[in-house]
Image: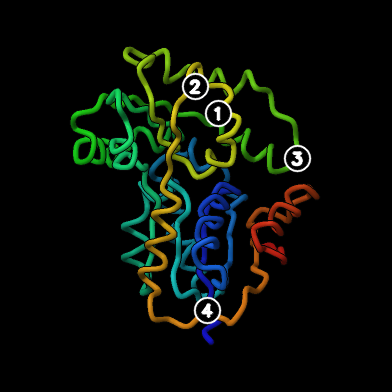
Amino acid sequence: MDARPVLFFDSGVGGLSVLGAARALLPAMPAVYVADSAGFPYGTKSEQEIGARVPALLGRLAERYRPRLIVIACNTASTIALAAVRSALDLPVVGTVPAIKVAALHSATRVIGVLGTDATVRQPYVDDLAARFASDCHVLRHGSADLVSLAEAKLRGEATDPARYAAILDGLFRQPEGARIDTIVNACTHFPLVERELQAAAPHPVRFVDGSDGIARRIAFLTRGQLWPDAPRPGLAVFTGGAPQSPSLVATLARYGLGTVETL
């Protein structure tokens, strides 16, 4: 048996969407989930802030929890700091990038929306993905910090206003050619957590895609041949900004297999 965990890292609870996909594929996987709530939200911060914070924090986390692999379950942190983290750490690091390739495979109209944080949608990395995998598509982008807040609120058990989801989607659909969008990339790991609300708010049926299943397969590939515990064990949730106060959020963490919560 090898009890070393896979460490999932995000600014908040969004990375639970990635953890859920990984647990579905690897049910015996030991997991530590870290929410950098002291630095939340990343999407409104500068590249310099994120580029300095994320590698330093993940270095501390790697020393503390000794993971076999780290997953940066955050598009913003990955598009800005993934290369620096990989250079600094002597273990595999899996990043999260917008699933533009997947969207291009599904789109019939060849008009794709990319819904992310402000910091993610402005990255040259997104330009490169669009050029490599969706060169025959019209790729529209919209950044929303409000949608991150809505996802966090939902997991705390708070009611959210459907009109706010519709207003966010208007940022895509009201752009030139936006009415022809048939596929939207959830380019923030928070957004799959409110996919049902987004579907209900869309002006016409649209497919939402994200990279969580691909990340799960990548974890399985990088850990092939390694030993796992014989049965699933409760994982650990770590918050950098104080313990969560919402009973609903604590219950959600437990549903994702995170039975213990601690602060860093």
State the residue position of label 1: 198
Callout 3: SS: loop
For mark 4, what is the residue? Answer: 4
Q: Residues within 10 Å of mark 2 (few under 14, many from 20)?
A: many
Residue at image mark 3: 157
Asked if the residue at tag 4 contacts the one at tag 2, i.e. Cβ–Cβ closer than 8 Å, the answer is no
Looking at marks 1 and 3 on the same chain, the residue that comes earlier in the sequence is marked by 3
Q: Which quadrant, please, contains the C terminus?
A: bottom right
Q: Quadrant of the N terminus?
A: bottom right
Measure how far apart labels 3 and 4 are at the Cα level.
Answer: 32 Å
Secondary element under disc 2, as helix, strand or loop, is helix
Q: Position of residue 173 (x, y in %)?
A: 42, 17
**Which residue is found at the position 41% from the left and 48% from the top?**
211
Camera-near label (1 vs 4) is: 1
Kindly identify the residue that appears in the image at 47 percent across and 39 percent down.
45
Q: Earlier in the sequence, mark 1 or mark 2?
A: 2
Image disc number at residue 82: none
- CA gap, disc 2 to disc 3? 23 Å
> CA separation, marks 1 and 3?
17 Å
Q: Which residue is mark 2?
A: 169
Determine the residue located farthest toward the bottom in the rendered image.
1
Kindly indicate whether the residue at mark 2 contacts the one at mark 1 (C-beta within 8 angstroms).
Answer: yes
Q: Residue 114 at x, y = what percent?
A: 38, 31
Q: Is residue 251 left or right of residue 6?
A: right
- N-term mark: 1 or 4: 4
Apparent side of residue 80 relative to residue 192 in the rendered image (left or right): left
Q: Which three-letter amino acid code belongs to the residue tagged 1?
A: Leu
